[in-house]
Amino acid sequence: MEPVKVSVIIPCYNEEATIEELLSALLAQTYPIDLMEVIIADGMSTDRTREKITAFKAGHPQLTIRVVDNHQRTIPAALNQAIQASTGAVLSRMDAHAIPAPDYIEKCLRALNAGLGENVGGVINIRAGSDTWVGRAIAVATAHPLGVGDAHYRTATKAGVTDTVAFGTYRRDVVKSIGGYDESLRINEDYEFNTRVRRSGGKIWVDPAIRVDYYSRPDLRSLARQYFSYGYWKYKMLRRHPDSLRWRQALPPVFVSGILMLSLLSTFWIPARILLAGVASLYLAILVVGSIQPAIQQKRSSLIPGVPLAIMTMHFSWGSGFLWSMLKSLVKGSEHDR
């Protein structure tokens, strides 16, 4: 493999719980440490994140680590600032609560050098964000086909071309060609970036042999906030790239719209009540059946109620966020036309 400098770029804010584990995983990479640098764009953390980074740097001077300030406190801005501060010919985008396998960078570079894609990533292995029955259920739900559909970076079993990857590795020339991350978005920056890669003629490559662990949200409240934001910003991204819509992204807002409409009609129309009860029963039955296999595999009966609860939270939060964003946009457009 041709030696090339790799810059690992990391957006970060209040990640004291996981930042040391991430840095340890980067230190343990099979790729030569002298050909790596770590650039952390910190959104002015208020916990002990910076203190832990400083301590790790002092204890492991062989790994080049630099911190830049992200006063905007958004992920796209953090990534762009990290890119600007980096010097590597290859960029590897990582999150502060992600833990790459020891051969993550090496395998990504092999795929890049083989010309398999312009942006290369692997499959996420979800770790529970809390050691509770809800936390474990969320970890299963956020990797379950009923929860994430055909998101290959979560479910792929064989390597191939896909629409997006979560933690991509790509050459600096890609950024020079298509530009950096869209700072008008707070979330969905990876999908928007990869959409432009594909439009420019590039390929996104996912390989399940490339592994990275990722901590899921610890409770239903934070999961709901996360997926509401996903839906909200997905609509804004789709206004710029409407042809990038996937069925997994369309189903939640359509489903939520249908449930809302049936609920409204059921207040005065009996057939709507019957249909609503039927749809709700079928939906719940599908989710319960889908939770049985992971419950058996992990020998945790709590997953049978927990996984459906987490998936419902994901669906309704994502769909509601998307619809709310669409409604706000329509109202704003209507006011602008007056």
Image (cartoon, rainbow, N blue to C red):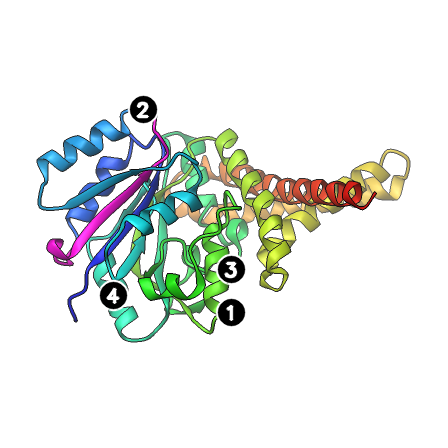
Give the Cα separation between the discs numbered 1 and 3.
20 Å
In this view of the protein, which residue sits in the foreground, 246 or 8? 8
Q: Earlier in the sequence, mark 3 or mark 4?
A: 4
Circle 4: element type: helix
Q: Which residue is mark 2?
A: 47
Q: Characterize the local packing of mark 1: few (<14), some (14-19) or many (20 or more) Cα atoms within 10 angstroms.
A: few
Q: Characterize the local packing of mark 4: few (<14), some (14-19) or many (20 or more) Cα atoms within 10 angstroms.
A: many
The picture places residue 17, in percent across and down from the top left corner, at 29, 30
Q: Earlier in the sequence, mark 1 or mark 4?
A: 4
Circle 2: element type: loop
Q: Which residue is mark 4?
A: 109
Q: Earlier in the sequence, mark 1 or mark 3?
A: 3
Circle 1: element type: helix
Q: Characterize the local packing of mark 3: few (<14), some (14-19) or many (20 or more) Cα atoms within 10 angstroms.
A: some
| Residues at marks 1 and 4 touching, judged by CB atoms closer than 8 Å | no
The residue positioned 87% from the left and 44% from the top of the image is 271
Can residue 38 be found in the magenta stretch? yes
Give the Cα separation between the discs numbered 3 and 4.
25 Å
Which label sits in the foreground, 1 or 3? 1
Q: Which residues are magenta?
A: 30-47
Badge 2 amino acid: Asp
The residue positioned 62% from the left and 40% from the top of the image is 321
Give the Cα separation between the discs numbered 1 and 4.
22 Å
Which label sits in the foreground, 3 or 4? 4
Q: Which residue is mark 1?
A: 199
User: Vertically, is 137 above or below 132?
Assistant: below
